[in-house]
Amino acid sequence: MGRQSQYTAEVASRICAELAEGKSLRAVCREDGMPSEATVRAWALDDVEGFAAQYTRAREIGYDRLGDELLEIADTPVTGVKTVSKATGIETTEGDMIEHRRLQVDARKWMLAKMLPKKYGDKLDLNHSGSIKTVTDMTDGDLAAIAAGSGS
């Protein structure tokens, strides 16, 4: 079956529902009968039939869902088998896949900080306390000290 390229409200709603479930646009567009990523992004950029707002809202809901998954991933041990080749042979251990879970958490944290920085990004404190001396506020002694390399 060919790719959908014409905008329809039905396809747009299906895309947004899956994005709101936390799926990536790439995964949604891989499904049979779905448009390409480029087509969906064009619909959003061109705001075809109000799609931009619907798409943006679905993305925000999907990102919030990823945020909800962070604690679940961090709190849920996953048992797996790890195999390491050594000079003495192959060593196999079974245990919690902590490295994999850490990667899942870190990837989600990074993505959320980039996609919704006001909500999930690091808070930057841009408040200034104290004083700033400008050249016009400096005395001749201050300027001489700076010129001599022992600035204040």
Image: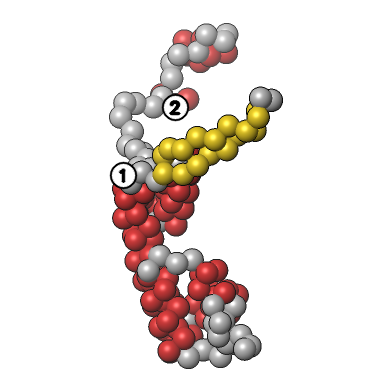
Query: Is residue 115 positioned above or below 133 on the image?
Result: below
Residue 125 circle label: none
Residue 82 is left or right of residue 51, and the answer is: right
- Label 2 close to label 1 by CB (< 8 Å): no
Question: Does dot 1 land on a helix, a strand or a loop?
Answer: helix
Residue at the location (40% across, 65% down)?
A: 22
Q: Position of residue 32 (x, y in %)?
A: 56, 82
Residue 45 or residue 112, whichever sits in front: 112
- In this rendering, position of residue 138 left or right of residue 72: right
**Please, is residue 80 above or below residue 134 in the view?**
below
The x, y position of residue 81, in whole percent, is: 50, 42
Amino acid of disc 2: Thr
Q: Quadrant of the C terminus?
A: top left
Label 2 – label 1 distance at C-alpha: 53 Å
Q: Element at badge 2?
A: loop
Above or below for 115 versus 84: below
Q: Amino acid at mark 1?
A: Asp
Judged by depth in the image, the label closer to the viewer, 2 or 1, is 1
Residue found at x 62% / y 33%:
90
Q: Quadrant of residue 58?
A: bottom left
Crowd tier of the residue under label 1, counting other residues whose Cα lies within 10 Å: few below 14, some 14–19, many 20 or above: few
Residue 134, which numbered label? Answer: 2
Task: Name the mark on residue 75.
Answer: 1
Instruction: Point out the tag, 2 or 1, that comes first from the N-terminus.
Output: 1
**Tally of marks:** 2
Q: Height in image: 29 above or below 48?
A: above
Residue 42 shows in the view: no
x then y, percent, for residue 25: 51, 69
Q: Residue at x 44, y 57 (%)?
A: 115
Between residues 80 and 31, which one lies in front from this camera angle? 80
